[in-house]
Amino acid sequence: MIVVLKPGVTEAAVEEVLVEIKKMGLTPHVLTGTERTVIAVVGDERALQKKPLAALPGVEEALPILSPYKLVSRECKPKDTVLDVGGVKIGGGKVVVMAGPCSVETEERLLSIAQDVKGAGASILRGGAFKPRTSPYAFQGLGEEGLAYLAEAKKKTGLPIITEIMDPRDMPLMMKYADIVQIGARNMQNFRLLSEVGSYSKPVMLKRGLSATIKEFLLSAEYILAAGNQQVILCERGIRTFETMTRNTLDLSAIPVIRRLSHLPIIVDPSHAVGKTDLVAPMAMAAVAAGADGLMIEVHSHPSEAYCDGEQALLPTQFKTLMTQLKRIAQACDRDM
Amino acid sequence: MIVVLKPGVTEAAVEEVLVEIKKMGLTPHVLTGTERTVIAVVGDERALQKKPLAALPGVEEALPILSPYKLVSRECKPKDTVLDVGGVKIGGGKVVVMAGPCSVETEERLLSIAQDVKGAGASILRGGAFKPRTSPYAFQGLGEEGLAYLAEAKKKTGLPIITEIMDPRDMPLMMKYADIVQIGARNMQNFRLLSEVGSYSKPVMLKRGLSATIKEFLLSAEYILAAGNQQVILCERGIRTFETMTRNTLDLSAIPVIRRLSHLPIIVDPSHAVGKTDLVAPMAMAAVAAGADGLMIEVHSHPSEAYCDGEQALLPTQFKTLMTQLKRIAQACDRDM
Amino acid sequence: MIVVLKPGVTEAAVEEVLVEIKKMGLTPHVLTGTERTVIAVVGDERALQKKPLAALPGVEEALPILSPYKLVSRECKPKDTVLDVGGVKIGGGKVVVMAGPCSVETEERLLSIAQDVKGAGASILRGGAFKPRTSPYAFQGLGEEGLAYLAEAKKKTGLPIITEIMDPRDMPLMMKYADIVQIGARNMQNFRLLSEVGSYSKPVMLKRGLSATIKEFLLSAEYILAAGNQQVILCERGIRTFETMTRNTLDLSAIPVIRRLSHLPIIVDPSHAVGKTDLVAPMAMAAVAAGADGLMIEVHSHPSEAYCDGEQALLPTQFKTLMTQLKRIAQACDRDM
Amino acid sequence: MIVVLKPGVTEAAVEEVLVEIKKMGLTPHVLTGTERTVIAVVGDERALQKKPLAALPGVEEALPILSPYKLVSRECKPKDTVLDVGGVKIGGGKVVVMAGPCSVETEERLLSIAQDVKGAGASILRGGAFKPRTSPYAFQGLGEEGLAYLAEAKKKTGLPIITEIMDPRDMPLMMKYADIVQIGARNMQNFRLLSEVGSYSKPVMLKRGLSATIKEFLLSAEYILAAGNQQVILCERGIRTFETMTRNTLDLSAIPVIRRLSHLPIIVDPSHAVGKTDLVAPMAMAAVAAGADGLMIEVHSHPSEAYCDGEQALLPTQFKTLMTQLKRIAQACDRDM
């Protein structure tokens, strides 16, 4: 940590900072510059997370040098984490596609879509039974009934399923039905939910929050790993910006940034990021070219009858065409799909 | 709702849209312009929240005209909502100040701060027992022990207490200890928590999410009202922008905007918005001038020893000076404080 | 245009709006809904750009239906615009690569880089002689001397050159030296510069402003076309968001959005967007997969000696490797490069 | 400057960094931490603005400690700058109000508004003759004709005038007509315009760009001071965020931040920030309470006939009421108005 002192700071104030640093078992080095004095702190600065030096009167700013997360970092574990979800490997270079409807609606429709996406090459089935909706008057999901339909579709197609959890109290249900538990963007900093999910042995996909920095995203993943669960997949799904032509702005540069910082697999959800059918395919293709470990794509056989997000769903035929295209790009990048 | 059709749309596609609109009991009016055809929909467009017309092939965009929330709106209830929290009125023009430490640390320190803020004119005591922290390694709060300290401070000072809830399972604890339950910015779209809190009869303060639009903020409040709880206070606490000199950007224009749209009281938390002690006072003063129904301010007797957010806490003496200043501004605006 | 009236609007206020609409030669249709009255305006609503209806007392909001730009739109010219810059075609599906140093430094160094990028397959040479720098104390470019070096490098390599203009008074210099005149992100809404450049017959590359919406970006291009110059290339180079791990956030979804809205070629500058060498390649690859008509990439033989932006420049060898990779992706997308 | 080296950096790479630092006449101090090595650089780090260390292979990040601006800083000039514009003092604690129409339209209308705002207590007249408009089809201003009307209004009311410059070539016109030259938000980083205006002896008001950080804002002001012109007023006018209920988000916390960092006066333009008449007054009041040195407010006698921004203009009577209110708040803050 580098502690920048205020201009014209008194000796007593400097002394106070030095005392605090030493109290935490760290070693301070005072550097007197032409305009400012700074104190460089040597030692594990994470000790300072509990007592911010910035509150001392002589301190202008305290700049951390080390990343605040540990378990999710490449420095902690240089090798890529690869999850095995019912035989499907996630991470480590292969491109995995999760597909299905935004929300589970009827058993027949879900099954039909599941068969379509399997036929096109998807290896995991997505479908929401608990839906986080901006409005209390919008469709909230079928709940356990939806989970049962997913289980049925899994039985018939063999596809492992991923579905969203919104409430820590639903974790037992998830253990029964889900192969991957998804934490949505709006719950990325629902720390109790993170800790709860972290205390089970079940793969988790954590979506980046709408206004979360990559550092905060990794710290939320750290909550899950710190609670004991190492099976975490990260998912970039667009951040909130001033642009309104797309639902959110897909931040594909997060892929190479995260790959450098963390060993966890990072996949991309272009459907929620762009919010419009005709933008999904180019962004899915770009995500693979940028190095994503996989994609999550919404597919619906009758988008105009979808209970939720129909305007961004691909038809099964569109999805099939896209999958062919994605395979060509994966190949051009020397990657398996 | 106004449905804008794609350029060169076919008659069949127009017909399909008309059928969908009528199915929902609404009346469409087709308007053929020089470049585009639009369909104006007459009737309660909230029916369309469940089936988005934008997914129909002929539709380019569906623009809602009505606000998506109802119970929180001024149109639904023109008169200001005024809450009574242990005799303290919130809403309706008076300026209420909630103050105290970011987190509850020790019983003695809490009590001393409580007495200080009471002496300076605060009427509600704040203090966190459950702390949502970006890092799993930061201080997470004392839990029920902290709530007990708050209860003790309330007993000794008579100040009602406000404290944060992070988990729906903690609501019974809150019923026992809290006078106002706070939902933090990171949980603004934790819809299960909103519904849970909405099902009790206990005042709630809902903070605006870091990247929440005012519309989304009101929809989250709508969740609580729709669940049966009408005692809701809104709190602006800064939004996330590109500026890094302040922790967040305090959006004071949200005050007059919300006052026009909703009957709920709106208060401001300048401490979390700016994140630095010396910026708190000017922003608190500006908030009162902009018409806020109150303020929430962090006060700590020993900021450099605070377990959390010490760099933004006011000393009791600074708080006292500020209160004097705030009263003068309230008076200049013909408001009580 | 759809004019939404305020709740409880008086008949006189409605009449006032109708009069204004008719004055402009447009036809109003009044639609009385259950909660609101709206007026749909039929006719070319661009007439309303000069007199905003929103200022009338009865009006709550005026929602435009038509896009505010015309000449840049696909509706106006359905076929892709293809520029011919000294024999190099830009637009229409081929992937063009512009490369070179951020700023022109010495004649020898520029020439050496020019030969390297030509050898790797670039077809246009970039290099700044006038540099827009955030700080007045940073290197501001060599001015005409730099332009002369570019001319020399063009003579020796045959590569057409692109260079930035910052001042309308420099247009004669640009006519003498540049093959493509670049307008930088910070000048995207320097309307006088746009009009000046629009009054010459010289290809222009317009970069998207840091906080410009796609609509504003297209309107800035419209300034150039409206002034008479049809040879415009658009360039996405990242927008400003809250994320700090990258210099800006590259908005690749702008590519398919702009392709649908406009006939102008759209290229991507990943170097300025990400600001770090090791992120350039994945974003360049993603841009091609997303459908960009080309790329602008910074290459420098001695990045640590660069006068500007050395931390984002590729070494010639890195650039060569990237070009090979880009060709494979272009091929996988059935595109020429 | 603090140079953070990459994990596992080689000795040769460290040596290379040390050489570069010494080359620039600065002194490096190497600090070997438990996980990382950092080099603290003592000396005037502005020397490093020309050669970014971040481009060296061993460097992960180079964190500046000193502010990159000098002349605008409080450290350089601790006392508030106070401008004298035709007898009106700007800066140093008094609250100055500039008011008038967005654009100059007719001589009669301008004069009538000028008399109204003077009567209400404004001391400077605003009015645009050159208008930066997003669309080339919107009203672009009357040009010199408008300047002549402003001169006429000044002659009749005695009010000094402020008007916007968009093109460096117009500076001679400005010298003839304007008392304060305004540089608009969209030109905040039009560096040639800044330098041009800086080379004259004429007060300048520089507006903050829509996506400019405070640091960038101050660096743009530094361009003007560095060119020789010390008479600069800063103006906060809202930044671009995701919120759409207001035209921009007024960042009032910029006032205390800038006051601490710079000696230049800082005023606020609430009209452009909020974009709606009924939000102007609360934000103007808040700006004074937050410590602004003045306000710029749009006033129009017939907003619905305004050529530009009518929806945000106050009527003269509304302005008069606001002025009375502002005086009370200024008084409550012990400030003159």
Image: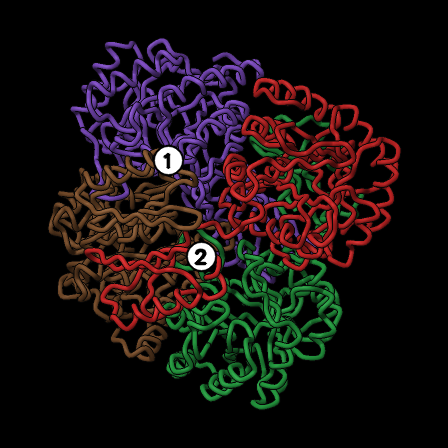
Chain colours: A purple, B brown, C red, D green
Residue D336 visible in the snapshot: yes
Out of B302 and A129, give the one closest to the viewer. A129
The chain letter for the residue carrying disc 2 is C
> What secondary structure is found at the residue carrying circle 2?
helix
Out of B127 and A31, give the one closest to the viewer. B127
> Residue A26 appears at what percent x and percent y?
52, 40
> What secondary structure is found at the residue carrying circle 1?
loop
Q: Can you identify the residue that label 1 sits on?
A: B10
Apparent side of residue A260 relative to residue C315 in the rendered image (left or right)? left
Out of D135 and B50, give the one closest to the viewer. D135
Residue A202 visible in the snapshot: no
Quadrant in the picture for residue A82: top left
Residue occupying the point 62% across, 60% down:
D187
Q: Can you identify the residue that label 2 sits on?
A: C45
Quadrant in the picture for residue B18: top left
Above-or-below relation of C194 to A96: below
Apparent side of residue B293 relative to residue C54 in the rendered image (left or right)? left
Residue occupying the point 70% across, 35% down:
C298
Q: Amino acid at mark 1?
A: Thr
Mark 1 and mark 2, same subunit? no
> Residue C32 appears at what percent x and percent y?
23, 58
Q: Amino acid at mark 2?
A: Glu
